Amino acid sequence: MEMQSELSNRLQIWTLAKMRAETQLERAIWERTKMVREIEELRRQREVLNQRIEFCKQKDAIGMAARLADTRCTFREYTTEEIQAAKVEVPRRLEQCLEGTLQPLHCFH
């Protein structure tokens, strides 16, 4: 009878240990599943951020290209007096540049 009682006690101990181990295993599986979901969400967020960064880079490049390609030609109407003054000033400056009395930087600015 004593041996049967001892075996029954051992069986209960092993059964409890098995249940505890199964509970711990289920908890570990649940934690792992939760971590995998969080990792997937972080990867998705990273991909969204990378797409936004790429979009901003392209937008900046397009803006820069547009600014570089913006060669505006402005039209200005000159008065008769300005045209007459230029007819006198341009040949005078050209002559000074050719003679060397004006630095090339100042020739027509």
Image (cartoon, rainbow, N blue to C red):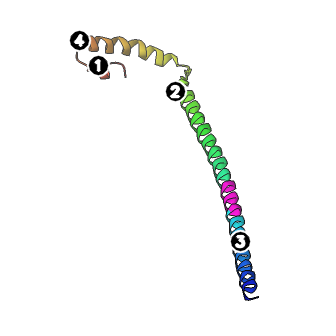
In space, the residues marked 4 and 3 are separated at their CA atoms by: 107 Å
Q: Position of residue 97 (x, y in %)?
A: 28, 14
Q: Residue 36's mark?
A: none
**Of tags 4 and 2, which is closer to the observer?**
2
Q: Nearer the viewer, mark 3 or mark 1?
A: 3
Looking at the picture, which amino acid does disc 2 mark?
Answer: Leu
To which residue does mark 3 refer? 18
Question: Which of the 4 image quarters holds residue 21?
Answer: bottom right
Q: Could you tell whether 71 is left or right of 93 in the image?
A: right
User: Which residue, given by chain and number where applicable, does mark 4 sit on?
Assistant: 99
Q: Residue at image x 70%, y 80%? A: 10
The mark nearer the N terminus, 3 or 1, is 3
- Image quadrant assignment for residue 89: top left
In the picture, the quarter occupied by the C terminus is top left
Residues in magenta, as a range: 29-38
Farthest residue toward the bottom? 2
